[in-house]
Amino acid sequence: MLTDEYPKRVTDIKGTPYQLVKLIGEGGQGAVFSTTDQRTAVKLIRANSLEATQLSSRIERIAHLPLWDYSLARPVIPLEPGEHFVGYVMDFLAGMVPILQLMLPPISDDPQAFPAWYVTETGGLRRRLVLLAKAAETLSALHSLGLVLGDPSPANILVSDDPSVDAAWIIDPDNIGVPLRDKEDGIPFGTPVASSFFTATYAAPELMRGSPVSSLTDVYAFAQIACHTLLTVHPFIGDLVSAGEPDLELPRAFAGEYPWICDEDDASNRTSRGYPAEIVLTSLLRQLSQRTFGGGRSEGRNFPLNRPGIATWAQALFGAADLTMPCKNCGATFYAINEDPDLMNACPWCDTKRGPFALLQIRRWIPALGERALQEPVYDMRPGLKPGFVVVPETPIVITRRIAYGEDGVTHPGSADTPLLELHYDGRAILSKPLQNSCDFWAAFDLAGTEVMDLSQSVELTIEKGGWLHFGSREKNHRVAQVVRPQGVRSSK
């Protein structure tokens, strides 16, 4: 809905008119609107925040950056300056809403309102993990080019309005650029310096003290958005902060003066609100959050260099999604693998006993090692990551190029999530169904590889007998998924 504060119609510098339809997101710098042309959106910036000539030059330079293979809105053309606003037109996909809508539960006395909203209306845990992982990959693509977004916020990360779709886009690209450097370093030709605008509720503490934006401030903002989306409570607004005077305590919390709500070393700001961390955060996601928000000298709240990188967040979120399974009663997704066995034997939403599942551990097949070919687990080149696991429930799951070949959305935009193989567990064995004719996949039923089957046909792998699904030629190094028995899992029968 538009308000009288904003115009209802704008024109770009070439004279093309745009009718503004709906306010998509609003921040301290301006607001983003959908238009009657569903392929475009318009950002309006308050006139005193940026001169029109500067904006026009900046948009032109950003539009020429090699970024548009990713899920990132491209700035198209500046607007003709108005009396109170300047702005620009950007690419847009219809049917998108700010990720903020996945953070704010409904206020209701009905005890079923929250589960209905979290699970049905907004897609549940697995969808949140995948959406956040895709947004993290887009940020990772920026960082890999030496660029920063500058102002990650819940208003400029858009997700599909349809809870069955896992699309995530980053809009509001006018802040993109290289981090501010010393004058003698110079600035790459044609690349703007990142604008130091930020959203106070998600900004890194050093931004509050006047430091410029960087990839590390991007990570801090994203990590807060991720935790807020999963926990449905801001990671620094615990009960201690909530009980205080908002005008005094909130700025202090956002400036890093309070511990985060799940701090391992300081429980003074725990929260009684939101969804429990042990149910929505894997142990790895909790570790990354502590390394980002913790107040110790080896942690990132006050020491930015100790924050994990955005690519590490992306892989951890995708890995967490691979550990989820659906409830056969209410359809909610939850972690089949959990440090607490009591949390992995029933659905946390309806307490229905979980269905059966099998577990695959992603490892590396190295033919030159002979008998030791399967002894080397897959470690990505990024430090601190554990071997990947994939839960195979009764409901079919898809093995993508991301899982089979280790591709990601940064190095292989548009293809990492290509489906290759469908798997499901019938309570006795993992059954496979090929989705691509060209897959060079095969199954082995013993370590020596003497019992081999081509995965162009259905193959059964049981937990009792074991087995390996190979994703590549027998002569070359490749990934392999080994059937393993989950530790601490009680029988569901």
Image: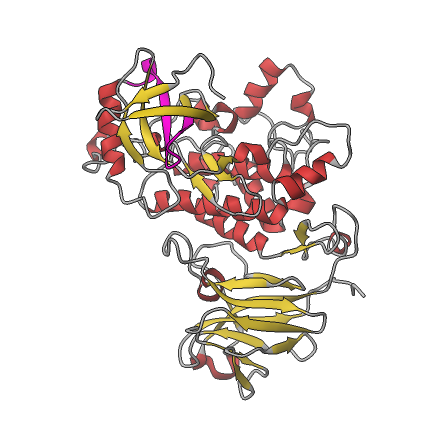
Q: Which residue is found at the position 36% from the left and 43% from the top?
A: 143
Q: Which residue is found at the position 50% from the left and 47% from the top?
A: 133
Q: Which residues are magenta?
A: 32-50
Residue 409: within the magenta? no
Q: Which residue is found at the position 41% from the left and 44% from the top?
A: 138
Can I make out residue 281 in this image? no
Q: 346 and 268: which one is in front?
A: 346
In the rendered view, would you say 214 is above or below 476?
above
Q: Residue furthest bottom?
A: 450
Tell me if 408 is positioned left or right of 180 in this view: right
Residue 438 image-quadrant placement = bottom left
Picture coordinates of residue 94, whole percent (x, y): 44, 38
Picture coordinates of residue 24, whole percent (x, y): 47, 28
Count of marks placed on residues: 0
Tell me if 115 is positioned left or right of 147 in this view: right
Q: Which residue is found at the position 58% from the left and 52% from the top?
A: 320
Residue 41: within the magenta? yes
Picture coordinates of residue 458, whole percent (x, y): 57, 77
Quarter of the image containing the C terminus?
bottom right
Can I make out residue 486 in this image? yes
In the rendered view, would you say 4 is above or below 382?
above
Q: 415 and 191: which one is in front?
A: 415
Q: Residue furthest right?
A: 493
Q: 366 and 84: which one is in front?
A: 84
Picture coordinates of residue 193, whole percent (x, y): 28, 31
In the rendered view, would you say 120 is above or below 56?
below
Q: 393 and 147: which one is in front?
A: 393
